Image: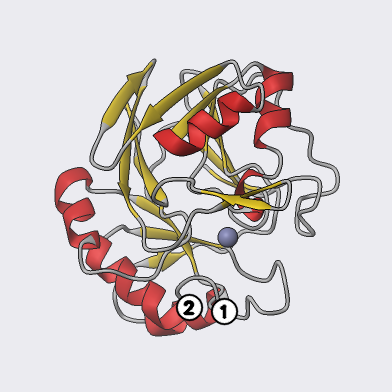
Amino acid sequence: MADLKGTVVTWLGHATVHIATAKGTSILIDPFIEQNPKFPKNYKLPEKIDLILATHGHGDHIADLVSVATTHHSTVVGMVELTGWAQSKGVKNAVGMNLGGSWKYEDLTISIVEARHSSGIEDGGKMIYGGEPIGFVISIQDGPVLYHAGDTSVFLDMQLIRDLYHPEVAMLPIGDHYTMGPKAAALAAKYLEAGTILPIHYGTFPVLTGTPAELAGFLEGSGIEVKALTPGESLR
Ligand SMILES: [Zn+2]
């Protein structure tokens, strides 16, 4: 298990993750709360959410983006088309970025990396262009480097993410059907050379059949550790 040096990473079911750094910066990724069947029942979002990171425009990633950003006065970070849409819905503070870019905030550097998926935003029966889907690398000062892959297939350029950022913990979708499954996620883990994999985006709906046990099976002997959490549980 990577030493997180005071950072706490809490899985909230599906692709929703909360990160609190040792210095107190609070980040929520892909808020899917009200309609998320795996959102932990007794979990209450922290009052302070500085940043909300959105990987792409699908409902299971941004359903609660606008409401949480409004209630918690958070800054929304993501692809420029997606943050533009959020602002058109009433979000006050947003940082629109694009692939390859990094942005510094307090004790963090947030970098936008590629993901292989789609990113249409369904809005009032229309499909709006949401820009490219992305992943995030979160480099924490005096702390770990975390990677949230968003929804993606495996792709060889994950080796560039390894070479540029050296993530220690990778949050990878393993559910299959809409993203990579366990076999491909194991290859992704090997490309990334992250010591710890936090599996996400599985078990939420019946079609998301991949399991952490399958992932661990494909990674046997690799030295890469799979940390399967229950929703509401944290890596520390
Ligand atoms: Zn998804």
- For ligand 1, tell me if the residue under mark 1 lies within 8 Å: no
**Residue at the image point whose x is 36% and y is 57% from the top:** 115
The residue under label 2 is 181
Can you say which quadrant of the picture contains the N terminus? bottom left
For residue 41, the mark is: none
Residue 25 is left or right of residue 114, and the answer is: right
Q: Is residue 223 visible?
A: no
Q: Residue 50 sits in which quadrant?
A: top right
Residue 140, how many percent across, how many down? 35, 30
Badge 1 density bin: few <14, some 14–19, many ≥20, Cα 10 Å: many
Residue 195 is left or right of residue 78, and the answer is: left
**Type of amino acid under label 1:** Gly
Residue 179 is left or right of residue 59, and the answer is: left
**Residue at the image point whose x is 79% and y is 40% from the top:** 43
- For ligand 1, tell me if the residue under mark 2 lies within 8 Å: no
For residue 210, the mark is: 1
Residue 204, how many percent across, how many down? 70, 66
Which residue is farthest front? 126
**Quarter, ligand 1:** bottom right
Q: Is residue 34 above or below residue 102?
A: below
Q: Is residue 28 above or below residue 33?
A: above
Q: Is residue 132 above or below residue 47?
A: below
Give the SS element for disc 2: loop
Q: Residue 178 sits in which quadrant?
A: bottom right
Badge 2 density bin: few <14, some 14–19, many ≥20, Cα 10 Å: many
Residue 147, how many percent across, how many down? 38, 48
Residue 111, how many percent across, how many down? 30, 36
**Residue at the image point whose x is 66% and y is 27% from the top:** 89
- Do the residues bearing badges 2 and 1 touch, measured as CB atoms within 8 Å? yes
**Type of amino acid under label 2:** Gly
Front residue of 75 and 79: 79
**Residue at the image point whose x is 58% and y is 30% from the top:** 86
